[in-house]
Image (cartoon, grey):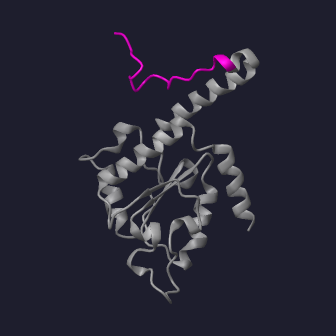
Amino acid sequence: MAVDERSPICMPPNDHSAQLKESPAILGFAVLQDLLNLARVNSLWPMTFGIACCSIEMMAAGMARFDLDRFGIIFRSTPRQSDVMIVAGTISHKFVPTIKTLWEQMPGPKWVIAMGNCAISGGPFAYEGQYAIVNGADKILPVDIYVPGCPPRPEGLIQGLLQLQKKITKGTIDANRRAEKAARRAKK
């Protein structure tokens, strides 16, 4: 059986011929990074972490009807085994230290998906004078993918996870740069 360029198991075509003439070490690193990204894409492990009503839809995405296992996405119950945090719901200011602790316990490279209007912008709780709700997960974590809706359907979460896989494959999310930003944010 012949495998063509559009097959999902093939590496994305990269022309490294110009780099090979300059330095073979750069080519080796580029191919290694592509292989690492391919391994990361096919084994995303989100943390089982739901804050509000959006977590019901997140749980539904892992059940038999939608079956995230077919994409290699398996929910883990501990941050030390997870590489994706799905912030699904309203974030109160009292809960921010706990979220930051869970984020810091996750090994790198790690990614964040903000699921639902409350996690994206505070949702219906965002109004002038409110003091208890964080107006978006991006105020406390470096969010990679936003999944809108109130609550978003499981198909929306699956699409968000597939978009994250695409970003990782293309290399648009640099794990080293993200780790440096996280370290600077932790010092604050």
Q: Is residue 62 above or below residue 52?
A: above
User: Residue 132, how many percent across, how many down?
Assistant: 51, 83
Q: Nearer the viewer, residue 8 or 81?
A: 8
User: Residue 52, how many percent across, how many down?
Assistant: 39, 70
Q: Is residue 92 magenta?
A: no
Q: Is residue 8 magenta?
A: yes
Q: Residue furthest front?
A: 18
Residue 40 is left or right of residue 147, and the answer is right
- Residue visible at 32% across and 65% down in the picture: 151
Q: Is residue 69 above or below residue 157?
A: above
In this orientation, does residue 44 appear? no
Q: Which stretch is magenta? A: 1-18
User: Residue 127, how many percent across, how many down?
Assistant: 45, 84
Main SS of the magenta part reads loop
- Residue visible at 57% across and 42% down in the picture: 172
Q: Quadrant of the C terminus?
A: bottom right
Q: How many marks?
A: 0
